Amino acid sequence: MSDPNAIFQNAYYVGNNFNAILYGVELVLYFASIWLIMQARVRTSKRSDRLFLFFSTGLLLMITIYVAVQAVFGQEMWIVNADYPGGSGQYLADNAAVWYQTLGSAASVVLNLMSDGLLIYRTYVVWSDWRVAIFPSILYFATAALGILTCYTSGVPNSDFFLGKSAQIALSYSSIVIGLNFSCSMLICGRILWVAKRMEATLGREVSKTYTGAASLIVESMLPYTCFGIAYVVTLGINSPLSIFFLSVYVMFTCVSPQMIILRVLMGRGWTREAATSGAAPRFNHPSSIGVSTTRITYGSDGTAINLQSFTKSGASNPELGIDSKL
């Protein structure tokens, strides 16, 4: 299949199918998060829970707009206008700047701003040091300006997101976004691996891998979001028609990855601001009131004393184990 338009159309079609699959994943994650928030509100109302509720709903709203726009444009291009003069390629060239495509682009830019804001905050949380967030924050404001410019240039009549000046601005915007993603992801991965090494030496592999294992690395660093973003920027930079597929998956993980972090935090397995401080290992809390056992791991002020407290299900006896071990 050497025809670029044929490759693009197939990539667009496959991307739309992946959109549908990942949208279903997002719905599961969203409603699981809402259920945990509602369970928590029965006990106590936290400001963070309300923020998670609004943030998750905002993510779902933006990704719903994007998925709907992609599906409608595909329907118009392949079914409603199947006999369009010049074929699907000409229809794309003539209608790439249609108003609802601009709406979809705006939704994806808002998604990026929300997700990147959360990623920068999680970088600060994992490191517990505001200085690590300075460079990503500078990139963040640059992406906001370029994102608005991308929406404007791609929405001008007869423009095309994948051609001309619009493509150049989109490439600049996406490159800076991915630079931000990559920087934060590496900072988070590096911190988690460092803490994992300390915990493994002290508490053993079985305890440390629960909170610093592969799942923690992938979720906390939004690794799928970053990896598909890199693939999208590379294919867009070489003008590959496959870029539309990677764009679709990348935008979906712009929503799915932060929702996974929110769910992990609500389950008590995510990092908090107390979880990583200079010279200290993390503390993780599980919501015992919904039937999940709780383990709290802390380091003393000197970074060597260890205290372990284990709590059983709500209503059961609460045995406590205290260990002070000097390394």
Image (cartoon, grey):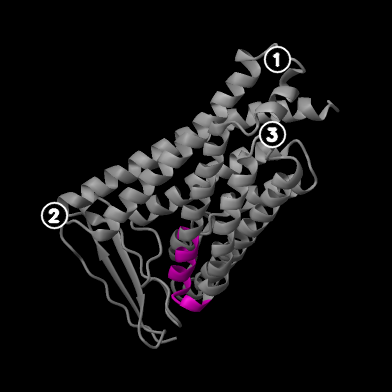
From the viewer's perspective, is 169 left or right of 284? Answer: right
Q: Secondary structure at mark 2?
A: loop
Question: Alpha carbon of mark 3 to alpha carbon of mark 1: how far?
Answer: 17 Å
- Residue 267 in sight: no
Identify residue for label 3: 158
User: Pointer 3 and pointer 2: residues touching (CB < 8 Å)?
Assistant: no
- 56 lies above or below 6: below
Identify residue for label 2: 315
From the viewer's perspective, is 174 left or right of 196? Answer: right
Near-viewer residue (151 or 223): 151
User: Pointer 2 and pointer 1: residues touching (CB < 8 Å)?
Assistant: no
Identify residue for label 1: 84
Q: Amino acid at mark 2?
A: Gly
The residue stretch that appears in magenta = 118-131
Is-magenta flag for residue 110? no
User: Which residue in the rendered view is the most extreme toward the right?
Assistant: 2
- Picture coordinates of residue 283 (x, y %)? 36, 70
Is-magenta flag for residue 119? yes
Image quarter hosting the N terminus:
top right
Near-viewer residue (19 or 221): 19
- 273 lies above or below 264: below
Please tell me which of labels 3 and 1 falls first in the chain.
Answer: 1
